[in-house]
Amino acid sequence: MPHQDTALMEDYARAADDLAGRLHRCLETPGSGAALADYVEGATDRRTALAAVRVLGPDVLAPALFGTRRIDPADREVLATALAHYPLDAGGTAETMCLDRVTTGLLHRAEGAVSGDGVAVDDAVDVDTFLRPEERWRPWAQQMAGVASCALPGVCGSLVEQARTRAADLGRGVARAMLRRDYRTAARLVRWTALADNNRAAVDQLNIEAVLRHLELCGSVNARLSLDVRIARLLRTRTRREGAG
Amino acid sequence: MTDELPVGTDTVGRVTGRALDWLHRNRLYGAFPSPESADLADPNGYYKSLGETALAASLVLRERSVLPAGHEQAAHELLDFAWGQLRQGDLLYERQLRHPLMTDPLEVYTHFGRGGHRHERLDTLLGHLAGLRAHQGAELMPNRRLAVANAARVAGFAGSGSSEGSGGGADWAGLLAATWLGRLPEPWAIDWMTAYCMTHTVFHVTDWGGLPHALPGDVVAYLECWLPVWIDIWTEIEEWDLVAELLIVDACLPRPGHHRDVWERLAAVQHADGLVPRDGKPVGDEPEQAFRDQQHTAVVTVVAGTLAQSRSGDASPR
Protein backbone atom coordinates (compact mmCIF):
# COMPACT_ATOMS: atom_id res chain seq x y z
CA MET A 1 0.00 0.00 0.00
CA PRO A 2 1.57 3.36 -0.94
CA HIS A 3 2.32 5.63 2.01
CA GLN A 4 3.72 8.73 0.34
CA ASP A 5 0.55 10.60 -0.44
CA THR A 6 -0.60 12.32 2.72
CA ALA A 7 -3.93 13.36 1.27
CA LEU A 8 -4.60 9.80 0.19
CA MET A 9 -3.72 8.50 3.66
CA GLU A 10 -6.16 10.99 5.16
CA ASP A 11 -8.83 9.69 2.79
CA TYR A 12 -8.07 6.14 3.88
CA ALA A 13 -8.24 7.15 7.54
CA ARG A 14 -11.63 8.82 7.06
CA ALA A 15 -12.90 5.78 5.22
CA ALA A 16 -11.59 3.50 7.98
CA ASP A 17 -13.47 5.62 10.53
CA ASP A 18 -16.65 5.33 8.48
CA LEU A 19 -16.30 1.58 8.22
CA ALA A 20 -15.46 1.25 11.91
CA GLY A 21 -18.65 3.15 12.75
CA ARG A 22 -20.66 0.83 10.53
CA LEU A 23 -19.10 -2.27 12.12
CA HIS A 24 -19.77 -0.86 15.56
CA ARG A 25 -23.45 -0.45 14.70
CA CYS A 26 -23.51 -4.02 13.39
CA LEU A 27 -22.13 -5.23 16.72
CA GLU A 28 -24.67 -3.18 18.65
CA THR A 29 -27.67 -4.30 16.62
CA PRO A 30 -27.89 -7.80 15.19
CA GLY A 31 -29.30 -7.83 11.68
CA SER A 32 -28.95 -9.23 8.23
CA GLY A 33 -27.43 -8.07 4.98
CA ALA A 34 -23.95 -7.69 3.61
CA ALA A 35 -22.30 -5.09 5.85
CA LEU A 36 -19.03 -4.84 3.93
CA ALA A 37 -20.58 -4.98 0.49
CA ASP A 38 -23.20 -2.38 1.44
CA TYR A 39 -20.44 -0.12 2.71
CA VAL A 40 -18.29 -0.42 -0.43
CA GLU A 41 -21.24 0.01 -2.78
CA GLY A 42 -22.37 3.10 -0.91
CA ALA A 43 -18.94 4.72 -0.85
CA THR A 44 -18.11 7.62 -3.13
CA ASP A 45 -14.72 6.13 -3.96
CA ARG A 46 -14.57 2.35 -4.28
CA ARG A 47 -10.77 2.10 -4.07
CA THR A 48 -10.69 4.10 -0.85
CA ALA A 49 -13.48 1.97 0.59
CA LEU A 50 -11.53 -1.19 -0.25
CA ALA A 51 -8.47 0.36 1.40
CA ALA A 52 -10.53 0.88 4.55
CA VAL A 53 -11.38 -2.82 4.52
CA ARG A 54 -7.66 -3.59 4.46
CA VAL A 55 -6.87 -1.02 7.15
CA LEU A 56 -9.35 -2.55 9.58
CA GLY A 57 -8.04 -6.05 8.88
CA PRO A 58 -9.59 -8.83 10.93
CA ASP A 59 -12.00 -6.41 12.60
CA VAL A 60 -14.19 -6.41 9.50
CA LEU A 61 -15.17 -9.94 10.53
CA ALA A 62 -16.10 -9.00 14.08
CA PRO A 63 -19.89 -8.95 13.47
CA ALA A 64 -19.72 -12.48 12.07
CA LEU A 65 -17.42 -13.73 14.84
CA PHE A 66 -19.63 -12.33 17.59
CA GLY A 67 -22.75 -13.66 15.87
CA THR A 68 -24.49 -10.40 15.06
CA ARG A 69 -24.17 -10.87 11.26
CA ARG A 70 -23.41 -13.85 9.09
CA ILE A 71 -20.77 -13.72 6.36
CA ASP A 72 -22.61 -12.83 3.17
CA PRO A 73 -21.14 -14.06 -0.16
CA ALA A 74 -21.01 -10.42 -1.22
CA ASP A 75 -18.86 -9.61 1.81
CA ARG A 76 -16.52 -12.44 0.95
CA GLU A 77 -16.21 -11.00 -2.53
CA VAL A 78 -15.37 -7.57 -1.12
CA LEU A 79 -12.63 -9.03 1.09
CA ALA A 80 -11.14 -10.94 -1.84
CA THR A 81 -11.21 -7.80 -3.96
CA ALA A 82 -9.60 -5.74 -1.22
CA LEU A 83 -6.82 -8.30 -0.79
CA ALA A 84 -6.28 -8.32 -4.56
CA HIS A 85 -6.21 -4.52 -4.80
CA TYR A 86 -3.87 -4.12 -1.86
CA PRO A 87 -1.78 -7.28 -1.64
CA LEU A 88 0.79 -7.64 1.06
CA ASP A 89 4.02 -6.77 -0.72
CA ALA A 90 7.40 -8.28 -0.04
CA GLY A 91 8.14 -5.54 2.47
CA GLY A 92 5.26 -6.54 4.70
CA THR A 93 6.10 -6.38 8.38
CA ALA A 94 5.50 -9.17 10.86
CA GLU A 95 2.62 -7.06 12.16
CA THR A 96 0.86 -6.80 8.79
CA MET A 97 1.55 -10.47 8.09
CA CYS A 98 -0.14 -11.38 11.38
CA LEU A 99 -3.16 -9.25 10.52
CA ASP A 100 -3.47 -10.72 7.04
CA ARG A 101 -3.04 -14.28 8.24
CA VAL A 102 -5.75 -13.80 10.87
CA THR A 103 -8.09 -12.07 8.42
CA THR A 104 -7.98 -14.89 5.88
CA GLY A 105 -7.95 -17.60 8.53
CA LEU A 106 -10.96 -16.18 10.36
CA LEU A 107 -12.82 -15.71 7.09
CA HIS A 108 -12.41 -19.38 6.27
CA ARG A 109 -13.34 -20.33 9.79
CA ALA A 110 -16.44 -18.13 9.82
CA GLU A 111 -17.54 -19.79 6.60
CA GLY A 112 -17.08 -23.19 8.17
CA ALA A 113 -14.32 -24.07 5.72
CA VAL A 114 -11.91 -25.02 8.52
CA SER A 115 -12.32 -26.43 11.99
CA GLY A 116 -9.98 -27.02 14.92
CA ASP A 117 -8.93 -24.94 17.90
CA GLY A 118 -8.73 -21.72 16.00
CA VAL A 119 -6.61 -19.55 13.77
CA ALA A 120 -2.93 -19.13 14.61
CA VAL A 121 -0.33 -17.04 12.81
CA ASP A 122 2.54 -19.30 13.78
CA ASP A 123 2.95 -20.93 10.37
CA ALA A 124 3.29 -17.51 8.68
CA VAL A 125 5.14 -15.46 11.31
CA ASP A 126 7.83 -16.34 13.83
CA VAL A 127 6.00 -14.72 16.73
CA ASP A 128 8.83 -15.19 19.22
CA THR A 129 11.10 -13.16 16.95
CA PHE A 130 8.50 -10.47 16.40
CA LEU A 131 7.34 -10.42 20.04
CA ARG A 132 10.46 -11.54 21.81
CA PRO A 133 9.61 -13.10 25.18
CA GLU A 134 12.61 -11.38 26.78
CA GLU A 135 11.56 -7.96 25.45
CA ARG A 136 10.83 -5.37 28.13
CA TRP A 137 7.22 -4.51 28.89
CA ARG A 138 7.00 -1.18 27.02
CA PRO A 139 8.16 -2.18 23.51
CA TRP A 140 6.43 -5.53 23.88
CA ALA A 141 3.12 -3.84 24.76
CA GLN A 142 3.52 -1.45 21.83
CA GLN A 143 3.91 -4.44 19.51
CA MET A 144 0.86 -6.11 21.01
CA ALA A 145 -1.16 -2.93 20.44
CA GLY A 146 -0.13 -3.08 16.79
CA VAL A 147 -1.68 -6.52 16.36
CA ALA A 148 -4.67 -5.95 18.64
CA SER A 149 -7.07 -6.57 15.76
CA CYS A 150 -6.02 -10.19 16.12
CA ALA A 151 -7.68 -10.27 19.56
CA LEU A 152 -10.90 -11.83 18.31
CA PRO A 153 -12.83 -15.03 18.94
CA GLY A 154 -11.30 -17.98 17.12
CA VAL A 155 -7.70 -16.78 17.31
CA CYS A 156 -5.22 -18.99 19.14
CA GLY A 157 -1.50 -19.76 19.07
CA SER A 158 1.52 -17.76 20.16
CA LEU A 159 -0.11 -14.32 20.06
CA VAL A 160 -2.82 -15.33 22.50
CA GLU A 161 -0.35 -17.33 24.55
CA GLN A 162 1.89 -14.29 24.99
CA ALA A 163 -1.09 -12.18 26.04
CA ARG A 164 -1.99 -14.80 28.62
CA THR A 165 1.50 -15.24 30.06
CA ARG A 166 2.35 -11.54 30.12
CA ALA A 167 -0.84 -10.15 31.62
CA ALA A 168 1.09 -7.83 33.93
CA ASP A 169 2.95 -6.34 30.97
CA LEU A 170 -0.33 -5.84 29.14
CA GLY A 171 -1.60 -4.05 32.23
CA ARG A 172 1.48 -1.84 32.31
CA GLY A 173 0.89 -0.98 28.68
CA VAL A 174 -2.72 -0.05 29.39
CA ALA A 175 -1.77 2.08 32.40
CA ARG A 176 0.97 3.86 30.44
CA ALA A 177 -1.33 4.57 27.52
CA MET A 178 -4.07 5.88 29.81
CA LEU A 179 -1.66 8.18 31.62
CA ARG A 180 -0.40 9.50 28.27
CA ARG A 181 -4.02 9.94 27.13
CA ASP A 182 -3.19 7.63 24.24
CA TYR A 183 -6.67 6.13 24.34
CA ARG A 184 -6.38 4.28 21.04
CA THR A 185 -3.45 2.25 22.34
CA ALA A 186 -5.17 1.70 25.68
CA ALA A 187 -8.30 0.36 23.99
CA ARG A 188 -6.29 -1.93 21.75
CA LEU A 189 -4.38 -3.41 24.67
CA VAL A 190 -7.56 -3.86 26.70
CA ARG A 191 -8.74 -6.22 23.96
CA TRP A 192 -5.83 -8.51 24.78
CA THR A 193 -6.48 -8.33 28.52
CA ALA A 194 -9.86 -9.91 27.83
CA LEU A 195 -7.99 -13.03 26.77
CA ALA A 196 -5.43 -12.93 29.60
CA ASP A 197 -6.77 -15.42 32.05
CA ASN A 198 -3.49 -15.85 33.94
CA ASN A 199 -1.95 -13.41 36.40
CA ARG A 200 -5.27 -11.76 37.10
CA ALA A 201 -3.96 -9.50 39.88
CA ALA A 202 -2.46 -6.92 37.52
CA VAL A 203 -5.54 -6.88 35.32
CA ASP A 204 -7.87 -6.68 38.30
CA GLN A 205 -5.95 -3.71 39.72
CA LEU A 206 -6.47 -1.89 36.44
CA ASN A 207 -10.24 -2.21 36.93
CA ILE A 208 -10.89 -2.93 33.27
CA GLU A 209 -14.56 -2.06 33.47
CA ALA A 210 -13.58 1.41 34.69
CA VAL A 211 -10.95 1.68 31.94
CA LEU A 212 -13.56 0.85 29.30
CA ARG A 213 -16.04 3.34 30.74
CA HIS A 214 -13.33 6.00 30.89
CA LEU A 215 -12.43 5.31 27.27
CA GLU A 216 -16.07 5.62 26.27
CA LEU A 217 -16.29 8.97 28.04
CA CYS A 218 -12.98 10.34 26.75
CA GLY A 219 -12.88 8.90 23.27
CA SER A 220 -16.46 8.54 22.14
CA VAL A 221 -15.90 10.71 19.07
CA ASN A 222 -13.30 8.32 17.66
CA ALA A 223 -15.02 5.55 15.69
CA ARG A 224 -12.07 3.15 15.66
CA LEU A 225 -11.51 3.58 19.37
CA SER A 226 -15.22 2.95 19.97
CA LEU A 227 -15.01 -0.21 17.89
CA ASP A 228 -12.03 -1.46 19.95
CA VAL A 229 -13.92 -0.74 23.16
CA ARG A 230 -17.02 -2.54 21.91
CA ILE A 231 -14.98 -5.58 20.84
CA ALA A 232 -13.16 -5.59 24.20
CA ARG A 233 -16.51 -5.65 26.02
CA LEU A 234 -17.79 -8.50 23.87
CA LEU A 235 -14.55 -10.45 24.36
CA ARG A 236 -14.80 -10.01 28.12
CA THR A 237 -18.36 -11.23 28.13
CA ARG A 238 -17.41 -14.25 26.04
CA THR A 239 -14.36 -15.08 28.21
CA ARG A 240 -16.43 -14.85 31.38
CA ARG A 241 -19.16 -17.01 29.88
CA GLU A 242 -16.64 -19.64 28.78
CA GLY A 243 -14.97 -19.50 32.20
CA ALA A 244 -18.34 -20.01 33.90
CA GLY A 245 -19.15 -22.91 31.57
CA MET B 1 36.72 19.02 52.68
CA THR B 2 38.35 18.85 49.31
CA ASP B 3 36.84 20.75 46.42
CA GLU B 4 35.28 17.65 44.96
CA LEU B 5 34.00 14.52 46.63
CA PRO B 6 35.30 11.17 45.51
CA VAL B 7 32.41 9.46 43.78
CA GLY B 8 31.51 5.90 42.93
CA THR B 9 32.68 4.44 39.66
CA ASP B 10 29.23 3.36 38.49
CA THR B 11 26.50 5.69 37.23
CA VAL B 12 24.51 5.73 40.47
CA GLY B 13 27.61 6.46 42.50
CA ARG B 14 28.71 9.24 40.16
CA VAL B 15 25.34 10.99 40.06
CA THR B 16 24.90 10.68 43.81
CA GLY B 17 28.37 11.84 44.73
CA ARG B 18 28.19 14.84 42.43
CA ALA B 19 24.74 15.82 43.74
CA LEU B 20 25.96 15.58 47.33
CA ASP B 21 29.00 17.64 46.42
CA TRP B 22 26.77 20.30 44.83
CA LEU B 23 24.55 20.38 47.91
CA HIS B 24 27.57 20.70 50.16
CA ARG B 25 29.33 23.32 48.04
CA ASN B 26 26.25 25.53 47.81
CA ARG B 27 24.96 25.03 51.34
CA LEU B 28 25.44 28.67 52.35
CA TYR B 29 22.67 29.66 49.94
CA GLY B 30 20.35 27.72 52.26
CA ALA B 31 21.27 29.86 55.28
CA PHE B 32 18.83 32.24 56.89
CA PRO B 33 19.67 35.76 55.71
CA SER B 34 20.21 36.59 59.37
CA PRO B 35 19.33 34.83 62.64
CA GLU B 36 16.66 37.44 63.32
CA SER B 37 14.98 36.71 60.01
CA ALA B 38 14.14 33.14 60.96
CA ASP B 39 10.36 33.28 60.86
CA LEU B 40 8.84 30.69 63.17
CA ALA B 41 5.51 30.89 61.38
CA ASP B 42 6.92 30.30 57.91
CA PRO B 43 7.85 26.65 57.46
CA ASN B 44 8.18 26.98 53.70
CA GLY B 45 11.01 29.48 53.78
CA TYR B 46 14.60 28.53 54.58
CA TYR B 47 13.46 26.23 57.37
CA LYS B 48 11.94 23.65 55.02
CA SER B 49 14.98 23.36 52.79
CA LEU B 50 17.26 23.05 55.82
CA GLY B 51 15.15 20.14 56.98
CA GLU B 52 15.39 18.50 53.57
CA THR B 53 19.16 18.89 53.53
CA ALA B 54 19.27 17.38 57.00
CA LEU B 55 17.20 14.43 55.77
CA ALA B 56 19.65 13.66 52.98
CA ALA B 57 22.64 14.06 55.28
CA SER B 58 21.12 11.84 57.96
CA LEU B 59 20.47 9.04 55.47
CA VAL B 60 23.99 9.29 54.06
CA LEU B 61 25.24 8.85 57.62
CA ARG B 62 22.90 5.93 58.22
CA GLU B 63 24.17 4.16 55.09
CA ARG B 64 27.78 5.37 55.31
CA SER B 65 29.26 1.87 55.37
CA VAL B 66 28.49 1.37 51.66
CA LEU B 67 29.44 4.85 50.45
CA PRO B 68 32.77 6.20 49.17
CA ALA B 69 35.15 7.93 51.58
CA GLY B 70 34.35 11.61 51.96
CA HIS B 71 30.58 11.29 51.89
CA GLU B 72 30.38 10.83 55.63
CA GLN B 73 32.35 14.00 56.28
CA ALA B 74 30.27 15.98 53.79
CA ALA B 75 27.08 14.69 55.40
CA HIS B 76 28.32 15.62 58.87
CA GLU B 77 29.18 19.12 57.69
CA LEU B 78 25.79 19.55 56.02
CA LEU B 79 23.97 18.35 59.12
CA ASP B 80 26.05 20.55 61.42
CA PHE B 81 25.46 23.53 59.14
CA ALA B 82 21.70 23.05 59.17
CA TRP B 83 21.70 22.43 62.94
CA GLY B 84 23.62 25.66 63.38
CA GLN B 85 21.07 27.54 61.29
CA LEU B 86 18.36 26.22 63.59
CA ARG B 87 20.39 27.53 66.52
CA GLN B 88 21.25 24.00 67.67
CA GLY B 89 17.56 23.14 67.83
CA ASP B 90 16.37 26.25 69.69
CA LEU B 91 14.37 27.39 66.69
CA LEU B 92 12.59 24.03 66.53
CA TYR B 93 11.92 24.18 70.25
CA GLU B 94 10.52 27.71 70.10
CA ARG B 95 8.34 26.88 67.13
CA GLN B 96 6.98 23.75 68.82
CA LEU B 97 6.39 25.60 72.08
CA ARG B 98 4.49 28.39 70.35
CA HIS B 99 2.53 26.07 68.05
CA PRO B 100 1.90 22.83 69.97
CA LEU B 101 -0.15 21.19 67.21
CA MET B 102 2.41 21.72 64.49
CA THR B 103 4.16 18.52 63.53
CA ASP B 104 7.07 19.80 61.46
CA PRO B 105 9.40 20.51 64.40
CA LEU B 106 9.29 16.81 65.27
CA GLU B 107 9.58 15.79 61.60
CA VAL B 108 12.66 18.00 61.09
CA TYR B 109 14.18 17.19 64.46
CA THR B 110 14.15 13.48 63.64
CA HIS B 111 16.75 13.96 60.90
CA PHE B 112 19.11 15.63 63.34
CA GLY B 113 18.40 13.03 65.97
CA ARG B 114 19.31 10.31 63.50
CA GLY B 115 22.60 12.11 62.91
CA GLY B 116 23.39 12.43 66.62
CA HIS B 117 22.09 15.90 67.54
CA ARG B 118 19.67 16.18 70.49
CA HIS B 119 17.98 19.13 72.19
CA GLU B 120 17.05 18.34 75.76
CA ARG B 121 14.17 20.80 76.20
CA LEU B 122 12.72 19.85 72.84
CA ASP B 123 12.87 16.19 73.85
CA THR B 124 10.95 16.99 77.00
CA LEU B 125 8.39 19.08 75.15
CA LEU B 126 7.85 16.45 72.42
CA GLY B 127 7.45 13.74 75.04
CA HIS B 128 4.77 15.83 76.72
CA LEU B 129 2.94 16.63 73.48
CA ALA B 130 3.04 13.02 72.28
CA GLY B 131 0.70 12.08 75.09
CA LEU B 132 -1.93 14.68 74.23
CA ARG B 133 -5.09 13.53 72.49
CA ALA B 134 -5.09 16.95 70.86
CA HIS B 135 -1.73 16.18 69.27
CA GLN B 136 -2.68 12.68 68.17
CA GLY B 137 -5.84 14.01 66.58
CA ALA B 138 -4.22 16.82 64.61
CA GLU B 139 -5.88 17.21 61.20
CA LEU B 140 -3.36 15.96 58.65
CA MET B 141 -3.21 14.44 55.20
CA PRO B 142 -2.97 10.63 55.53
CA ASN B 143 0.59 10.45 54.20
CA ARG B 144 1.61 13.29 56.52
CA ARG B 145 0.19 11.36 59.44
CA LEU B 146 2.59 8.57 58.48
CA ALA B 147 5.43 11.11 58.40
CA VAL B 148 4.66 12.06 61.99
CA ALA B 149 4.39 8.42 63.05
CA ASN B 150 7.76 7.61 61.51
CA ALA B 151 9.38 10.69 62.99
CA ALA B 152 8.07 9.65 66.39
CA ARG B 153 9.32 6.10 65.85
CA VAL B 154 12.82 7.24 64.88
CA ALA B 155 13.11 9.94 67.53
CA GLY B 156 11.75 7.69 70.24
CA PHE B 157 8.38 9.27 71.00
CA ALA B 158 6.28 6.16 70.61
CA GLY B 159 3.05 7.76 71.73
CA SER B 160 2.88 10.23 68.87
CA GLY B 161 0.92 9.13 65.83
CA SER B 162 -0.87 6.45 67.78
CA SER B 163 -4.52 5.71 67.25
CA GLU B 164 -7.14 4.10 69.35
CA GLY B 165 -6.67 0.36 69.69
CA SER B 166 -3.05 0.34 68.60
CA GLY B 167 -1.68 -0.27 72.06
CA GLY B 168 0.29 2.94 72.38
CA GLY B 169 2.31 2.53 69.16
CA ALA B 170 1.28 3.70 65.72
CA ASP B 171 -1.38 1.69 63.95
CA TRP B 172 0.68 1.32 60.79
CA ALA B 173 -1.85 -0.84 58.98
CA GLY B 174 -4.61 1.67 59.70
CA LEU B 175 -2.48 4.65 58.76
CA LEU B 176 -1.46 3.01 55.48
CA ALA B 177 -5.03 2.00 54.69
CA ALA B 178 -6.09 5.65 54.89
CA THR B 179 -3.71 6.70 52.11
CA TRP B 180 -4.19 6.65 48.34
CA LEU B 181 -1.66 3.82 48.03
CA GLY B 182 -3.33 1.80 50.75
CA ARG B 183 -6.39 1.33 48.55
CA LEU B 184 -4.32 -0.23 45.71
CA PRO B 185 -6.05 2.19 43.34
CA GLU B 186 -6.32 2.11 39.56
CA PRO B 187 -2.72 2.87 38.55
CA TRP B 188 -3.77 4.88 35.51
CA ALA B 189 -5.63 7.36 37.69
CA ILE B 190 -2.60 8.84 39.40
CA ASP B 191 -1.58 12.48 38.97
CA TRP B 192 1.55 14.44 39.73
CA MET B 193 0.58 15.55 43.24
CA THR B 194 -0.83 12.15 44.17
CA ALA B 195 2.40 10.56 42.97
CA TYR B 196 4.31 12.65 45.51
CA CYS B 197 1.84 11.58 48.21
CA MET B 198 2.31 7.95 47.20
CA THR B 199 6.10 8.23 47.41
CA HIS B 200 5.91 9.70 50.89
CA THR B 201 3.62 6.93 52.07
CA VAL B 202 6.34 4.45 51.12
CA PHE B 203 9.14 6.58 52.58
CA HIS B 204 7.53 6.77 56.00
CA VAL B 205 6.22 3.22 56.33
CA THR B 206 9.68 1.87 55.45
CA ASP B 207 11.57 4.63 57.28
CA TRP B 208 13.28 5.66 54.06
CA GLY B 209 14.22 2.15 53.05
CA GLY B 210 15.51 1.20 56.47
CA LEU B 211 12.61 -1.25 56.88
CA PRO B 212 12.16 -2.65 53.35
CA HIS B 213 9.87 -5.42 54.59
CA ALA B 214 7.50 -3.09 56.44
CA LEU B 215 5.08 -2.76 53.52
CA PRO B 216 2.39 -5.46 53.28
CA GLY B 217 2.86 -8.01 50.51
CA ASP B 218 -0.05 -6.75 48.43
CA VAL B 219 1.33 -3.22 48.44
CA VAL B 220 4.80 -4.49 47.47
CA ALA B 221 3.31 -6.50 44.59
CA TYR B 222 1.28 -3.47 43.50
CA LEU B 223 4.35 -1.22 43.47
CA GLU B 224 6.50 -3.79 41.70
CA CYS B 225 3.90 -3.92 38.96
CA TRP B 226 3.10 -0.23 38.50
CA LEU B 227 6.18 1.69 39.64
CA PRO B 228 7.95 1.01 36.30
CA VAL B 229 5.02 2.62 34.48
CA TRP B 230 5.08 5.74 36.61
CA ILE B 231 8.86 6.02 36.29
CA ASP B 232 8.49 5.67 32.54
CA ILE B 233 5.89 8.38 32.04
CA TRP B 234 7.51 10.95 34.32
CA THR B 235 10.91 10.25 32.78
CA GLU B 236 9.39 10.83 29.36
CA ILE B 237 8.23 14.33 30.34
CA GLU B 238 11.44 15.02 32.26
CA GLU B 239 9.98 15.51 35.73
CA TRP B 240 13.35 14.68 37.27
CA ASP B 241 12.44 15.62 40.83
CA LEU B 242 9.52 13.19 40.83
CA VAL B 243 11.57 10.57 38.99
CA ALA B 244 14.17 10.70 41.77
CA GLU B 245 11.40 10.31 44.36
CA LEU B 246 10.11 7.27 42.47
CA LEU B 247 13.63 5.83 42.47
CA ILE B 248 13.63 6.21 46.26
CA VAL B 249 10.40 4.20 46.35
CA ASP B 250 12.11 1.51 44.30
CA ALA B 251 14.99 1.41 46.80
CA CYS B 252 12.50 1.01 49.65
CA LEU B 253 11.09 -2.25 48.25
CA PRO B 254 12.25 -5.70 49.31
CA ARG B 255 13.48 -6.38 45.74
CA PRO B 256 14.54 -3.08 44.17
CA GLY B 257 14.43 -2.93 40.38
CA HIS B 258 17.25 -0.34 40.27
CA HIS B 259 16.23 0.99 36.83
CA ARG B 260 19.74 1.56 35.53
CA ASP B 261 18.46 3.13 32.32
CA VAL B 262 16.77 5.87 34.34
CA TRP B 263 19.97 6.55 36.25
CA GLU B 264 21.69 6.93 32.90
CA ARG B 265 19.09 9.55 31.97
CA LEU B 266 19.70 11.39 35.25
CA ALA B 267 23.43 11.27 34.60
CA ALA B 268 22.85 12.76 31.16
CA VAL B 269 20.86 15.74 32.47
CA GLN B 270 23.05 16.38 35.52
CA HIS B 271 25.06 19.56 35.04
CA ALA B 272 28.84 19.61 35.13
CA ASP B 273 28.80 21.15 38.61
CA GLY B 274 26.55 18.38 39.98
CA LEU B 275 23.22 20.23 39.84
CA VAL B 276 20.32 17.95 38.97
CA PRO B 277 17.53 19.93 37.27
CA ARG B 278 14.08 19.49 38.75
CA ASP B 279 12.51 19.23 35.29
CA GLY B 280 13.21 19.78 31.61
CA LYS B 281 12.98 23.58 31.77
CA PRO B 282 16.13 25.73 31.52
CA VAL B 283 18.00 26.45 34.75
CA GLY B 284 18.83 30.08 35.48
CA ASP B 285 22.41 31.29 35.77
CA GLU B 286 22.00 33.07 39.09
CA PRO B 287 23.57 30.67 41.64
CA GLU B 288 21.38 31.45 44.66
CA GLN B 289 18.17 31.21 42.67
CA ALA B 290 19.43 27.98 41.07
CA PHE B 291 20.02 26.60 44.55
CA ARG B 292 16.55 27.64 45.71
CA ASP B 293 14.92 26.06 42.64
CA GLN B 294 16.95 22.86 42.41
CA GLN B 295 17.94 22.08 46.02
CA HIS B 296 15.07 19.65 46.59
CA THR B 297 16.04 17.65 43.51
CA ALA B 298 19.61 17.35 44.76
CA VAL B 299 18.27 16.12 48.09
CA VAL B 300 16.07 13.42 46.58
CA THR B 301 18.82 12.39 44.15
CA VAL B 302 21.25 11.94 47.03
CA VAL B 303 18.67 9.92 48.96
CA ALA B 304 17.75 7.79 45.93
CA GLY B 305 21.37 7.09 45.05
CA THR B 306 22.43 6.44 48.62
CA LEU B 307 19.64 3.92 49.14
CA ALA B 308 20.20 2.34 45.73
CA GLN B 309 23.83 1.73 46.57
CA SER B 310 22.92 0.44 50.00
CA ARG B 311 20.32 -1.95 48.55
CA SER B 312 22.38 -3.08 45.57
CA GLY B 313 22.72 -6.54 47.07
CA ASP B 314 18.95 -6.96 46.94
CA ALA B 315 18.80 -6.25 43.25
CA SER B 316 16.13 -7.40 40.89
CA PRO B 317 17.33 -5.33 37.90
CA ARG B 318 14.69 -4.03 35.50
Image (tube, grey):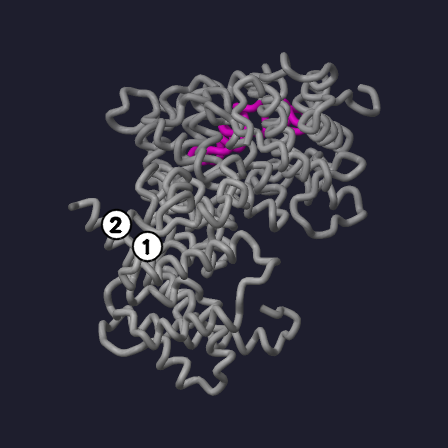
Q: Is residue A213 visible?
A: no
Q: Please say if B145 is above or below B3.
A: below
Relative to residue B240, is residue B131 drawn left or right? left
The spot of residue B107 in percent (x, y) is 50, 29
Relative to residue A101, is residue B24 drawn left or right? right
Crowd rating for badge 1 (residues with CA inside 10 Å; few <14, some 14–19, many 20+) = few
The residue type indicated by label 1 comes to Ala
Residue visible at 53% across and 52% down in the picture: A94
Query: Badge 1 sits on which subunit?
Result: A
Quadrant in which the C terminus of chain B appears: top right
Residue visible at 47% across and 77% down in the picture: A15
* Residue occupying the far top of the picture: B65
Residue A169: image quadrant is top left
Residue visible at 35% across and 31% down in the picture: B218
Residue toward you, A67 or B78: A67
Which portion, as a residue range, is magenta? B82-111
- Classified by dominant secondary structure, the portion drawn in magenta counts as helix
Which is more foreground, mark 2 or mark 1? 2
* Residue occupying the far left of the picture: A245
Residue toward you, B185 or B40: B185
The spot of residue B145 in percent (x, y) is 40, 34
Residue A86 within the segment the image draws in magenta: no
Residue B98 within the segment the image draws in magenta: yes
The residue where tag 2 is placed is: A239
Q: Please say if A142 is above or below A1.
A: above
The residue type indicated by label 2 comes to Thr
N-terminal-most mark, 2 or 1: 1
Residue visible at 51% across and 78% down in the picture: A48
Q: Which mark is residue A210?
A: 1
